[in-house]
Amino acid sequence: MVANILVKRMGYRLGELGIDQTQLARRTGLARQYLCRVLHGKTIPRDKNLYLIAKGLECTVEYLQVETINEPPAPPYGGTIGDLIKSQELLWAELRCLRAELKELKERRRN
């Protein structure tokens, strides 16, 4: 359950800030591939990394982990064209991340 909240909140903050995984990687010092795995719910970050992610997303660790009753669910996009474009940019960033992972796997397989 925590992973689902984390994934949702990270994606929402990326959209709010208008940044992609590569930019978040620069802000946090964490590998883009690692952030990609976190954003796909394949990895749950340790406390230190969660702190770095929260700092990079300009929010608190609690925001990333705790879903409150009073808070409305984050929409996939806010309803404006600008938010839709940001959402599309995030999808392209995720696609680039997946392509990089695939390329990495292929290279490992060759060796």
Image (cartoon, rainbow, N blue to C red):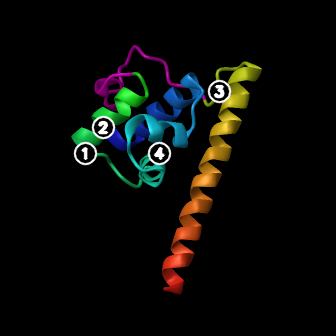
Mark 4 neighbour density, 10 Å: few (under 14) some (14–19) many (20 or more): many
Q: Which amino acid lies under the numbered mark 4 shown in the image of this protein?
A: Leu
Q: Position of residue 60 (x, y in %)?
A: 32, 23
Q: Secondary structure at mark 1?
A: loop
> Label 2 to label 3, Cα distance in Å?
24 Å
Q: Which amino acid lies under the numbered mark 1 shown in the image of this protein?
A: Arg
Q: Secondary structure at mark 2?
A: helix
Q: Which amino acid lies under the numbered mark 3 shown in the image of this protein?
A: Tyr
Residue at 29%, 25% in the rendered image: 62
> Label 4 to label 3, Cα distance in Å?
17 Å
Q: Which amino acid lies under the numbered mark 2 shown in the image of this protein?
A: Leu
Residue at image mark 3 = 77
User: Can residue 1 be seen in the rendering of this structure?
Assistant: no
Mark 2 neighbour density, 10 Å: few (under 14) some (14–19) many (20 or more): many
Asked whether disc 1 touches disc 2, contact meaning CB atoms under 8 Å apart, the reply is yes
Magenta stretch holds residue 61? yes
Q: Secondary structure at mark 4?
A: helix
Q: Residue 100 occupies which quadrant of the picture?
A: bottom right
Residue at image mark 1 = 46
Residue ranking furthest to the right: 81
Judge left or right: residue 25 versus residue 91. left
> Label 1 to label 3, Cα distance in Å?
28 Å
